[in-house]
Image: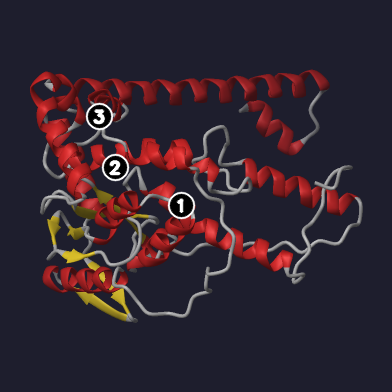
C-alpha cells in the first residue's frame, strides 16, 4: 500500500519496483488459493449435504426453482403473463414447430450415395443378444437424474438378474414387430435457458427426457449404427464417426485458409449454419436417404417407429402440457439421433459434390499433391 501511494507521487527505486512486483504476485497467489479453498469447501458441503433431505438441499432446490421459473414470455411482440397463458403459448409454439410442413426441397434422385454392403446391412438387423442389451445398459451413466418413469440406470444395474428377462422380452418384441408399446416412446421436453433472464422461446434449448426403456433401445440401435456409419458418410464428416474427432473439420478448414492467405491463392469459403438443425429434419427425407444408402427395410421400419411415432409434452414450470405428436425433427437427448442427423447432413454433402462434378464449383486443392 505504501509503495502504491509513493509510486503515484514520485518515481520508485529499482529495489522498490522489484519489491512491489513480488508483493503483487504474492497477493494474486494468495487470492487464487483462497478461491480454490472456497470452491473445495463448497464441493465438500455439497458432497456431504447435497443429496440428503437437509435445509441446505432444500434451499438449493428452492433457489434453482425460482431462478428457472418462466413468469412471462414475448410471443410475436406481445407479452404473455400468467401460468395458464404461458403454458398455452409454449404448447402452441412447440406443437406448431414440430408439425410437418410442405416446402420445396432439392431432389436427391439421381445423386450417388455411398451404400452399405450386404454384410453391413445384415449386422444392423440380426437378433439382439443378452450380452448386447447388457452392454447398452452398462454404457449409460448410473447416477444421472432419473428418467420420467423415475428409474435410473443404477437401479437397473443393481437388479439386473431380476430385470434382464423383462428387457429381453421388450427388445425381442420390438425386433419381431417393429412396434413400440404406447407410452414407451413418450417424452418430456424440458426448457434449458441459453441466456440469463430469457423472454423469448428461442432463448431456451429444448432437451428431451427419454424413458429408460426407450433409451436402452436407442443405445442398442446407436451401437449398431455407429459401427457402419463410416461406410456411408463422407470423409469430410468427422462428428460421431469412429476414429475421428469433431474438431477435425475445423482444423482442416483453418489450415486451408492459412495456406490460401500465405500463397495468395483464391478461395471461396462457404460457411453454413444449421439453425435449429435437429428440429428441421424431415423424416420422409431421412427415410429416402437410408433407402438410397442400402439400409435394410426392417431397419428403416424401426427408425420410422422411433421418430415419427414419438409423442411429447413440454414441462412448463415443472408441469407438463398436453401431449402432441412429433411429425418432424430429431429430439435432443436421445443417443441415436446424432447419428441420424449425420445421415441427413450427408445429403447436403452429396449435393455439393454433384455441383462440383457439373462444373458449377471447383474444389480447393491443398498441399503439394493437390489433395
Compared with 248, 24 (above or below) is: above
**302 lies left or right of 18:** left
**Mark 2, mark 1: which one is toward the viewer?**
1
**326 lies left or right of 55:** right
Q: How far is the residue under mark 2 from the one under mark 1?
A: 21 Å
**Could you classify mark 3 by the number of other residues whose Cα lies within 10 Å: few (under 14), some (14-19), or many (20 or more)?**
some
Which comes before the other along the chain, label 2 or label 3?
Answer: 3
Residue at 10%, 32% (x, y): give it: 166
Pointer 1 residue: 294
Compared with 137, 282 (above or below) is: below
The answer to whether marks 2 and 3 mark residues whose Cβ atoms lie closer than 8 Å is: no
**Residue 81 image point, x, y percent:** 19, 73
Identify the element where label 3 is drawn: helix
Residue at 38%, 26% (x, y): give it: 39
Pointer 3 residue: 133
Rendered-image quadrant of the N terminus: top right
In the depicted view, which residue is nearer to us: 161 or 61? Answer: 161
Q: How many marks?
A: 3
Pointer 2 residue: 218
Which comes before the other along the chain, label 1 or label 3?
Answer: 3
Amino acid at each position: 500500500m505504501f509503495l502504491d501511494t509513493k509510486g503515484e507521487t514520485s518515481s520508485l527505486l529499482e529495489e522498490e519496483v522489484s519489491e512491489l512486483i513480488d508483493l503483487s504476485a504474492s497477493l494474486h497467489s494468495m487470492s487464487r488459493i483462497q478461491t480454490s479453498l472456497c470452491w473445495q469447501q463448497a464441493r465438500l458441503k455439497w458432497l456431504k449435504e447435497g443429496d440428503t433431505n437437509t435445509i441446505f438441499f432444500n434451499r438449493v432446490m428452492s433457489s434453482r426453482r425460482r431462478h428457472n421459473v418462466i413468469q412471462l414470455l414475448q410471443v410475436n411482440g406481445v407479452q404473455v403473463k400468467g401460468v395458464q397463458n404461458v403454458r398455452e403459448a409454449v404448447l402452441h409454439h412447440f406443437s406448431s414447430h414440430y408439425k410437418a410442413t410442405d416446402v420445396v426441397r432439392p431432389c436427391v434422385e439421381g445423386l450417388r450415395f455411398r451404400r452399405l454392403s450386404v454384410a453391413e446391412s445384415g449386422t444392423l438387423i440380426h437378433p439382439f443378444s443378452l450380452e448386447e442389451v447388457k452392454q447398452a445398459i452398462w454404457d449409460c451413466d448410473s447416477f444421472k437424474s432419473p428418467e420420467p418413469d423415475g428409474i435410473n440406470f443404477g437401479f437397473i444395474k443393481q437388479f439386473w438378474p431380476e430385470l434382464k428377462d423383462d428387457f429381453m422380452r421388450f427388445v425381442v418384441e420390438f425386433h419381431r414387430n417393429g412396434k413400440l408399446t404406447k407410452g414407451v416412446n413418450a417424452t418430456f421436453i424440458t426448457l434449458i435457458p441459453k441466456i440469463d433472464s430469457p423472454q423469448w422461446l428461442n432463448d431456451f434449448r429444448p432437451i428431451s427426457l427419454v424413458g429408460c426403456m426407450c433409451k436402452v433401445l436407442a443405445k442398442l440401435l446407436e451401437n449398431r449404427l455407429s459401427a457402419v456409419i463410416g461406410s456411408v458418410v463422407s470423409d469430410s464428416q468427422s462428428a460421431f464417426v469412429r476414429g475421428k474427432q469433431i474438431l477435425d473439420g475445423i482444423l482442416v478448414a483453418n489450415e486451408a485458409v492459412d495456406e490460401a492467405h500465405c500463397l495468395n491463392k483464391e478461395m471461396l469459403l462457404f460457411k453454413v449454419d444449421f439453425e435449429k438443425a435437429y428440429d428441421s429434419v424431415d423424416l420422409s427425407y431421412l427415410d429416402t436417404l437410408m433407402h438410397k444408402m442400402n439400409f435394410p427395410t426392417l431397419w428403416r421400419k424401426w427408425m420410422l417407429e422411433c421418430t415419427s411415432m414419438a409423442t411429447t409434452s413440454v414441462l412448463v414450470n415443472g408441469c407438463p402440457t398436453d401431449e402432441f405428436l412429433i411429425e418432424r425433427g430429431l429430439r435432443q437427448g436421445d443417443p441415436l439421433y446424432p447419428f441420424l442427423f449425420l445421415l441427413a447432413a450427408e445429403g447436403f454433402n452429396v449435393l455439393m459434390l454433384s455441383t462440383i462434378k457439373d462444373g458449377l464449383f471447383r474444389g480447393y486443392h491443398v498441399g503439394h499433391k493437390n489433395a
